Amino acid sequence: MDQANKKKVDRADFLKGKLEEVAHADPMKLFSVWYQEAIEKSCADPHAVVLTTATTDGKPSSRIVYMRDLLEEGVIIYTNYTSRKGIEITKNPNVALLFYWDCCERQVRIEGQVEKINPLISDDYFAARPRISQIGAWASEQSTVIPDRASLEERVAFYEKKFPNEVPRPPHWGGLIVEPNYFEFWQGRLGRLHDRICYEKSADDWATYRIAP
Ligand SMILES: Cc1cc2nc3c(=O)[nH]c(=O)nc-3n(C[C@H](O)[C@H](O)[C@H](O)COP(=O)(O)O)c2cc1C
């Protein structure tokens, strides 16, 4: 890497916050505070999260999705159940989520197990989506190989005709809830001496500890 590019990669120090003690006994509370702050401070795409799934033989794959709701029990996302991620989680429900809120110099790592949400909740969410997204959920066989862009557009035209009015939710599309069993809250600090506070679920409680940066 040349000097000019190296300079771009090396960033200035992290100075925007501290996480010196466990701020909440319940990590979901702290997560929700950090998420609100990311929104208030206008972080880019604060709902965007990297979702990592893995095959049963441990081969991981990651992609960005949007967190669409935050409940006491976990993080809600929506996707195609027959996509690569959808198939991987039916065999291995262990997943990881990674949020990065640059404007707050924070990242949050979450690990947990994922399951489908109640179909009635998926119905409500789907009904509130823009029509083009509803049609897209029918037209796109997410993660499958397609011959060209035109074939996708043909499928869009087909479903536009098939559903001239209301678009029902496709059975292969809906919500997932990630129920966390581990959190790491990372706050950037001066000289790379970052704060890292972890929460690990034990029975019905959370054990907390600090790890080295
Ligand atoms: C900013 C952003 C948000 C996205 N949100 C979603 C989402 O909420 N749900 C989803 O299924 N895919 C979303 N995607 C697309 C995924 O990254 C991915 O391409 C798709 O889900 C297929 O992944 P898979 O083949 O690994 O299953 C988003 C992509 C970006 C860049």
Image (cartoon, rainbow, N blue to C red):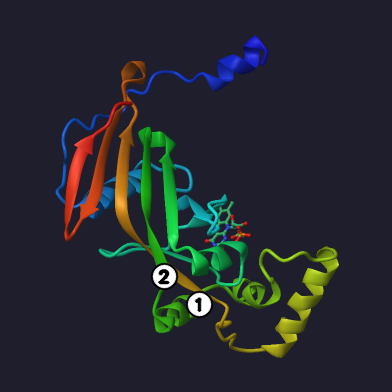
Q: How many marks?
A: 2
Task: Please provide percent x and percent y for residue 184.
Answer: 31, 42
Instruction: Say which of marks 1 and 2 sits in front.
Output: 2
Q: Residue at x 45, y 78 (%)?
A: 122
Residue 126 has which mark? 1
Q: Quadrant of residue 155?
A: bottom right
The amino acid pointed to by label 1 is Phe
Task: Please provide percent x and percent y for residue 92.
Answer: 48, 63
Mark 2, residue position? 115
Q: Quadrant of residue 83?
A: bottom right
9 left or right of 49? right
Q: Sequence order check: which comes first, mark 1 or mark 2?
A: 2
The amino acid pointed to by label 2 is Glu
Task: Please provide percent x and percent y for residue 197.
Answer: 25, 37
Task: Please provide percent x and percent y for residue 117.
Answer: 40, 75
**Cα distance in 3D space between marks 1 and 2:** 18 Å
189 or 113, which lies in front?
113
Looking at the figure, which quarter contains the C terminus? top left
Residue 150 has which mark? none
164 or 174, which lies in front?
174
For disc 1, the neighbor class at 10 Å (few under 14, some 14 to 19, many from 20) is: many
Ligand 1's image quarter is bottom right
Looking at the figure, which quarter contains the N terminus? top right
Label 2: element kind: strand
Q: Residue at x 72, y 66 (%)?
A: 144
